[in-house]
Amino acid sequence: MRLGTEGSYPHCISVWGDVPDLIRNLHASKAMYFGKLVKLRAPEMTDLEHVMKYWNTYQSRRFLGSAIPMSETTEKQWLERATTAQPWEQGSMVLVIEDKKSGEFLGTTSLFDISKPFRRAEFGVAIHNPEKHGKGYGTDATNVTLWIAFHVLGLRSVYLYVMAQNKRAIRSYEKAGFKHAGVFRKAMFSDGEYHDLAAMDILCEEFLEECPPGQLIAES
Ligand SMILES: CC(C)(COP(=O)(O)OP(=O)(O)OC[C@H]1O[C@@H](n2cnc3c(N)ncnc32)[C@H](O)[C@@H]1OP(=O)(O)O)[C@@H](O)C(=O)NCCC(=O)NCCS
């Protein structure tokens, strides 16, 4: 991962036809943060068509506590908020996850309920297309978001809630460094029954042990 925007490569614009695909994709998608498999960028209203493609898919939404079909109007309103929210003003930051190589829209990652006094935030992530689950994208996007939380926003801790039967998500969060903090019993309803809801968190110092200041998740 590296910090960099279009302005980092001004010379490329004049020789657009000659630049390698990777650099051209970088410009096209305005990605700013890079993992090993994904890149993260700000959401745009044009992402509405990507969101609508797989968002109403039960395999992805059954673990999110909101498996109610979402209309384009509702998602447009969500995107309007996501595209204008500022971490310290509205308390949230949504980023689009793209495949680093192809630039394909994969889903979103977010920090929300960002607390100024306690310098902590809740984390959420979703890879929309079920066929893209289990390929490492979610863990990579989580790592990059934690990098932003601790290296850019200066948070002290990041926490999340996950349904206890969502084993893939829990394994992914463990790989990213989250630790188990506790369990709310029978707190979520899904697939016809009530499930435990696990809480997990990671402290700044734990993340910095693995990824100290000056170290990136991956180069662009
Ligand atoms: C949760 C999510 C973001 C994880 O991202 P992902 O790209 O699918 O996950 P990854 O491939 O990075 O890692 C998954 C890990 O879980 C493991 N795993 C998969 N299914 C598992 C299961 N049933 N039990 C235990 N581990 C499992 C994988 O083997 C992998 O671990 P490994 O690398 O050690 O082998 C993604 O699956 C998703 O968006 N799911 C739908 C929405 C959702 O559940 N969001 C989270 C809500 S809290």
Image (cartoon, grey):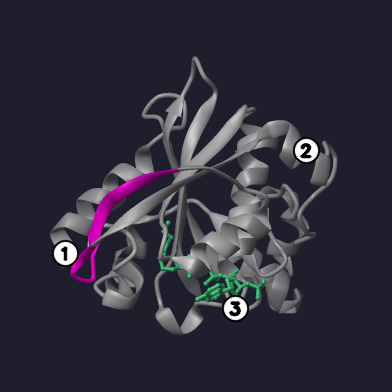
Residue 185 drawn at (x, y percent):
33, 47
Q: Which residue is mark 3?
A: 135
Residue at screen point 49% across, 14% down: 117
In reply to whether residue 9 is colored magenta, the answer given is: no
Q: Counting other residues with Cα less than 10 Å from the Cα at mark 3, is it few (<14), some (14-19), or many (20 or more)?
A: few
Amino acid, disc 2: Leu
Q: Residues within 10 Å of mark 1 (few under 14, many from 20)?
A: few
Q: Position of residue 175 (x, y in %)?
A: 67, 59
153 left or right of 111 in image: right
Residue at mark 3: C-beta within 8 A of ligand 1: yes
Residue drawn at the location 55% of the way across and 65% of the way down: 138
Task: Give the residue at x 75% y 74%.
Answer: 19
Q: Can you identify the residue that label 2 sits on?
A: 208
Which region is colored magenta? 183-193
Question: Mark 1 and mark 2 in contact (Cβ < 8 Å)?
Answer: no
**In whole angstroms, how far apart are the C-alphas of marks 2 and 1?**
38 Å
* Residue 132 placement (x, y as % from top left): 50, 80
- Up the image or down, 99 lies above or below 172; here it is below
Is tag 2's residue or tag 1's residue first in the polypeptide sequence? 1
Q: Tell me where residue 55 sits by quadrant.
A: bottom left
Above or below residue 82? Residue 34 is: below
Secondary structure type for disc 2:
helix
State yes or no: residue 185 in magenta: yes
Q: Nearer the viewer, residue 103 or 118?
A: 118
According to the picture, the residue beneath numbered tag 1 turns out to be 68
Task: Give me the residue at 74% from left, 70% from top.
Answer: 15
Q: Are marks 2 and 3 in contact (CB under 8 Å)?
A: no
Q: Residues within 10 Å of mark 2 (few under 14, many from 20)?
A: some
First in sequence, mark 2 or 3: give its number. Answer: 3
